[in-house]
């Protein structure tokens, strides 16, 4: 049996180690920069959801209803507040389940580190002491715990996916509603333009009516002046005219005398009739002016109400888009974190294949005269140690992140979800004062919790970096001793 693997095994191991290191470097880099911010954004997202629930409880929010005609994206309720409360409650359950899962992953990853330490120690023992059976026991324990971590991460990911699906459904419905609202707003803008034209026409009609009224008042004044002038003349001359007419009728010509008397009477009646007509026209124009003023006021109120409702609708949509967008970012980061946890098991498979392949083959060659036992173990350690160190670092990341996540969720995230979930029970009966008080409480929660979340995450990051540095230094020293 030829056990000289210099032609292919080292190259093969170098490729494996390089790939594992690449994934490890990328994963740790992401976790070191993003996971603290991910957890730190949770209180902010919780507060935004809570404020949206409060905002959707106001009277103006009834104008924003969500409908979805596509069966594939059926909403449980078309009302915004109900969907937001549902998202808050599902999110609360997701974080509660994740707390339990993260605690389990933290313990498992810590135990996995011990199994890896045991395997590393085996490589430094004399070949005669190293037991293939003991190696297999350690490998089985390692594999079982890695699979348990993977299953737990997938379970948590499934819970968060269900939460994400609800968020996506609502976000999509809001976007579709926004398109419909845009169409409605376009129509409303046309209506607004029409209403403004009505206001302008009402003002014009009022101005015309006012000018006409002024003209009629002038004519009425003229009529009154004419009547007074004619009345004065008639008061002095009427008796004379009547007497003259009657005198003419009796002495000169009966018909001529009666005609003069009749003309005098009809002249008085004509002046009175002209004054009465002017008074009626004046009253009609006055009514027209009052009607024009009323129409102008109604049009003005209608425009103001339209603008007011439009602004309220835009405000709700702006805040809602912000809330759902931040929530989706939080869910994306958690999904990436859980995906990293799930993928670690594939790195364990690489290590187990090395042990069950290369290690077993070398162990079978122990005692052979063809090669030196100590040299075999040295070469094997140089092949295995980088992979073991890489995986150990990743499980260390899992342990620190899962532990910090559990602490943050239990201490800071869950209380926030409890707070906003309770809003759904009372939000429909909240007064404006109650809503303001709830908003103040949510802002206080964010101010008190967000800094603490960041502090816990940053402390975990520092500990993580120190531990990774320590593990790496220890591995390098071991490789130098064995070489």
Image (cartoon, rainbow, N blue to C red):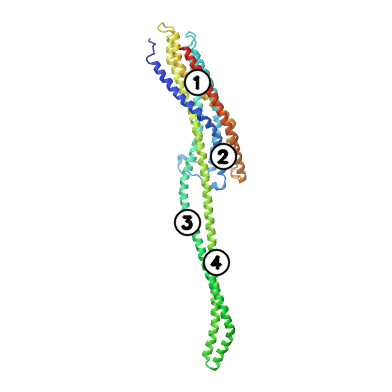
Q: Position of residue 280 (x, y in %)?
A: 54, 72
- Name the residue: 54% across, 61% down: 294
SS at circle 3: helix
Residue, disc 1? 392
Q: For the residue carrying disc 4, how many other residues have a C-alpha within 10 Å: few (<14), some (14-19), or many (20+)?
A: some
Residue sitting farthest toward the bottom? 251
Q: Position of residue 104 (x, y in %)?
A: 55, 25
> Which of the marked residues, 4 or 1, is nearer the chain's N terminus?
4
Q: Position of residue 9 (x, y in %)?
A: 40, 16
Residue bearing the label numbered 4 = 287
Circle 3 is placed at which residue position? 194
Instruction: Please report contact status of discs 1 and 3: CB closer than 8 Å, yes or no.
Output: no
Q: Earlier in the sequence, mark 2 or mark 4?
A: 2
Q: In the rendered view, would you say 466 is above or below 483?
A: below
Between 160 and 23, the one lying in front of the other is: 23
Asked if labels 1 and 2 touch by Cβ distance under 8 angstroms, the answer is no
Q: Is disc 2 placed on a helix, strand or loop?
A: helix
Q: Which residue is mark 2?
A: 50
Quadrant (top left, top right, bottom left, bottom right) of the N terminus: top left
> Is 450 positioned to the left or the right of 150 in the image?
right
Say if residue 403 shows up in the picture.
no
Query: Pointers 3 and 2 in contact (CB under 8 A)?
Result: no
Q: Quick check: 362 left or right of 53? A: left
Instruction: Determine the CA span between mark 4 and mark 3.
Output: 25 Å
On the question of residue 27 being in view, the answer is yes
Q: CA distance from mark 4 to mark 1?
A: 92 Å
């Amino acid at each position: 049996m030829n056990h000289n693997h210099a032609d292919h095994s080292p190259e093969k191991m170098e490729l494996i180690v390089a790939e594992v290191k690449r994934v490890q470097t990328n994963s740790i880099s992401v976790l070191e920069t993003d996971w603290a911010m991910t957890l730190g954004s949770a209180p902010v997202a919780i507060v935004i959801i809570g404020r949206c629930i409060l905002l959707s409880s106001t009277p103006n929010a009834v104008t924003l209803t969500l409908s979805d005609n596509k069966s594939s994206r059926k909403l449980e309720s078309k009302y915004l507040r109900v969907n937001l409360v549902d998202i808050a409650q599902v999110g609360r359950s997701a974080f509660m389940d994740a707390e339990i899962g993260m605690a389990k992953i933290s313990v498992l990853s810590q135990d996995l580190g011990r199994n890896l330490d045991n395997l590393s120690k085996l490589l430094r023992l004399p070949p005669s002491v190293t037991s293939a059976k003991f190696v297999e026991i350690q490998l089985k324990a390692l594999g079982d715990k890695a699979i348990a971590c993977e299953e737990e991460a997938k379970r948590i990911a499934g819970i968060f996916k269900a939460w994400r699906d609800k968020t996506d459904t609502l976000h999509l419905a809001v976007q579709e509603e926004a398109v419909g609202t845009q169409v409605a707003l376009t129509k409303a803008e046309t209506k607004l333009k029409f209403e403004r034209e009505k206001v302008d026409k009402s003002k014009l009609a009022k101005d015309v009516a006012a000018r006409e009224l002024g003209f009629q008042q002038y004519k009425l004044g003229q009529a009154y002046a004419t009547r007074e002038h004619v009345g004065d003349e008639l008061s002095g001359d009427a008796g004379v005219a009547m007497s003259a007419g009657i005198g003419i009728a009796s002495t000169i010509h009966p018909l001529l005398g009666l005609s003069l008397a009749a003309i005098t009477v009809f002249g008085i009646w004509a002046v009175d009739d002209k004054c009465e007509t002017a008074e009626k026209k004046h009253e009609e124009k006055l009514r027209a002016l009052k009607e024009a003023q009323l129409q102008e006021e109604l049009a003005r109120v209608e425009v103001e109400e339209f603008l007011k409702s439009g602004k309220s609708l835009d405000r709700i949509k702006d805040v809602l888009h912000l809330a759902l967008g931040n929530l989706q970012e939080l869910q994306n980061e958690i999904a990436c974190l859980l995906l990293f946890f799930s993928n670690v098991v594939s790195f364990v498979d690489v290590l187990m294949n090395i042990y069950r392949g290369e290690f077993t083959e070398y162990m079978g060659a122990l005692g052979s005269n063809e090669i030196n036992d100590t040299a075999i173990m040295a070469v094997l350690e140089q092949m295995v140690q980088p992979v073991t160190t890489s995986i150990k670092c990743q499980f260390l990341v899992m342990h620190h992140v899962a532990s910090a996540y559990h602490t943050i969720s239990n201490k800071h995230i869950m209380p926030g979800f409890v707070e906003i979930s309770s809003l759904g029970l009372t939000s429909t009966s909240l007064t404006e004062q109650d809503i303001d008080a709830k908003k103040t409480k949510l802002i206080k929660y964010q101010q008190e919790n967000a800094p603490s979340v960041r502090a816990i995450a940053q402390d975990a990051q520092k500990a993580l970096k120190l531990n990774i540095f320590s593990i790496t230094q220890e591995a390098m020293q071991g490789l130098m001793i064995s070489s």
